[in-house]
Amino acid sequence: MGPMGKALLIVIGVVLLVYAIFDLLATPKEQVRALPKIVWFVLLFVPYVGALLWIFMGHARQAPPPRQRGAGGWPPPGPRGPDDDPDYLRGL
C-alpha cells in the first residue's frame, strides 16, 4: 500500500472518530446501550473498532414517526396559497 492509501486510511479513521465523539456527546444517556457513556468514550479511541461499535451498537436508533394519512389513504395535502383557500377567498 502506497503513501496515499495509508493517508486515506488515517483520514477515514479520524473522520470516524470525530463523528462518533460528537454523536456520543449528543446522545442522551437514556438512549445509550450496553455501557455507560464514559466507557464508550474510552472505547472510541480503539482505532476503527471503537467508533464502528458505537455507530452500530452503542445507541438506540429512534424509528421515524409513522406518516399520517388523509382521507382515502393519501398523505394530507400540503400548505396552500391564499388564492387556493376557499375560506380566505370568501372573506375578500
Image: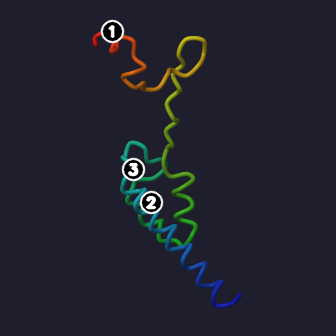
Q: Quadrant of residue 72?
A: top right
Q: Residue furthest bottom?
A: 3
Q: Name which residue lies at 52% across and 64% down.
A: 51
In the image shown, does 85 or 26 lie closer to the viewer?
85
Of callouts 1 and 3, the N-terminal one: 3
Residue type, mark 3 in image: Thr
Element type where label 1 sits in the image: helix
Q: Which mark is residue 40?
A: 2
Image depth: mark 3 or mark 2 in front: 3
Q: Name which residue lies at 49% across and 22% down.
A: 77
Q: Which quadrant is home to the N terminus? A: bottom right
Of callouts 3 and 2, the N-terminal one: 3
* Image spot of residue 14 (x, y percent): 50, 74
Q: Quadrant of residue 69?
A: top right
Residue type, mark 2 in image: Trp
In the image shown, does 3 or 42 lie closer to the viewer?
3
Instruction: Give the class, few, some or many, for how many residues have Cα within 10 Å of label 2's Cα (few <14, many ≥20).
Output: many
* Image spot of residue 42 (x, y percent): 43, 66
Alpha-carbon span between mark 3 and mark 2: 12 Å
Are the two marked residues, 2 and 1, in contact with CB atoms closer than 8 angstroms? no
Q: Is residue 49 left or right of residue 34?
A: right
Residue type, mark 1 in image: Arg
Q: Which residue is mark 1?
A: 90
Q: Which quadrant is home to the C terminus? A: top left
Q: Which mark is residue 27?
A: 3
Q: Name which residue lies at 28% across and 10% down.
A: 91
Q: Residue furthest top?
A: 90
Up the image or down, 86 lies above or below 17; here it is above
Q: Is residue 10 left or right of residue 21?
A: right
Q: Residue furthest front?
A: 92
Alpha-carbon span between mark 1 and mark 3: 49 Å
* Image spot of residue 41 (x, y percent): 41, 63
